[in-house]
Image (cartoon, grey):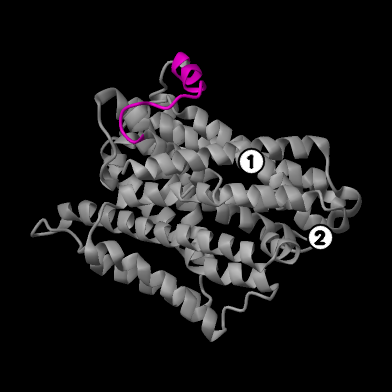
Amino acid sequence: MPNPSRFSKLTKFASSIAPGVFLIGYVIGTGSVTTMAAAGAKYGLSLIWTSFLASFFTYIMFVAISKSTIVTGKTLLYNFKVNFGAGVTIFLIAGLMTTQIASIIGVMGIVTEVIAEFSKQFSATGAGINTLHSALFFTLLLCSLFWFGRHKAFLEALAILVALMGLSFVVTMFMVMPPPVEFLRGMVPSVPSEGNAALLIAGMVGTTMAGVCLVTRSTLVIEKGWTPRDFKVEHRDSFISVTLMLVINVAIMASAAGTMFVRGLEVTHAVDMIQALEPLAGQLAATLFVVGIVSAGLSSLFPNYLLGLWLLSDFFDTPRDTRRPGYRALVLGCASVGLVIPLFGGSPVAIMIASQALSPFIMPVMTILLALLLNKKAVMGEYAGGKLLNAGLGITVVFTLYMLYTAIIGFSAM
């Protein structure tokens, strides 16, 4: 029999890192897979430095956001509204909503495109499942789960499938491992001259330092009920979550580099990413990828639908009452934008990468406000300031400003 004391410690440890694990599931979704695979296929490992820097600065932001939340007992957006005014907070909310609406459009576009292509082999006419039909089906499915509150088990099942896809990329990375020297060269920051590397770099940062992920971090800390005595636990949780995100992101990039970049192939359509798993799964790669990417898409669509509700609840410091008519109308409105590509057309991959590249437009403001909040003695009391954290946030501000510049360059070159 297992030692009760050891089992209790293991359970307590698992509970302590739950917020970080949740955010891994949120960040490692369709946007992350698409952006990292596109980067690996187009540029090999030359942009791997982007993932490492983005992960490092995400860790700093996690720690800083968690500290302000633990000390004040309030969410990040509510603290911003109280201390810096409603105007700048509404600007952040608008930026977050713009990013997520673009993300919903891209995610649903990729999911329906993958299903349409995969189903052609089972169709008598070879046409596959109509993208509008599958988009309507998934939209109605997710909205009904939200409406009746039956989504928890569904999302847990999807999380398992997404985890299997993530593990598959890790295994594939070791099977097609590029020479170690390529990893070392990729750690030296550089921006390739060919293609729109700037937009892809901004998207890679945006999918890791996602504004909604940072805001959600604050809410998860509130739900854990952590106090200043739990700072070490929080630091460990942040480190584990960011490290795992980095490993999976690098694995996706390396898999694409080892399978597609070496053959001169790029990710222009969602189904192109299937080739990144061929060394592991062979002919089963298509099925494995389709199940994983659809699961990742649906599991990320659901929180995207709810983002407006969460942001308004944080802004007004009110409970997340999903039964309120106004909130339900907001969710249905967000869900409906997923029909844009099936109805009007467009490139899901390009839209997905662009949606991730929107995040750097609000990151400098969020980082500066967070630094100012942490140094307000009236708010943080004895926990105000901190030389190491202030230095980290200072460097983060510089990085986010550079990424804002990079995003602007990328969008202007589209």
Residue indicated by mark 2: 72
Q: In this view, does 241 lie to the left or right of 161?
A: right
- The amino acid type of the residue labelled 2 equals Thr
Distance between the alpha carbons at the discs numbered 1 and 2 = 23 Å
- Identify the main secondary structure in magenta: loop
Residue indicated by mark 1: 397
**Residue name at image x 40 percent, y 58 percent:** 102
Q: How crowded is mark 2: few (under 14 residues within 10 Å), some or many (20 or more)?
A: some
| Residue 265 sits in quarter | top left
**Residue name at image x 69 percent, y 52 percent:** 369
Residue most toward the right?
A: 382
Q: Where is residue 85 in the image (x, y as percent from the top left)?
A: 69, 65
**Residue name at image x 72 percent, y 45 percent:** 63
Give the magenta part as a residue range.
181-196
Q: Is mark 2 on a helix, strand or loop?
A: helix
Q: Where is residue 292 in the image (x, y as percent from the top left)?
A: 39, 49
Q: Position of residue 307 (x, y in %)?
A: 53, 66
Q: Is residue 329 left or right of residue 73?
A: left
**Residue name at image x 42 percent, y 33 percent:** 253
- The amino acid type of the residue labelled 1 equals Val
Give the label, 1 or 2, closer to the camera. 1
Residue 11 visible in the picture = no
The one nearer the camera, 46 or 387, is: 387
- State yes or no: residue 186 in magenta: yes
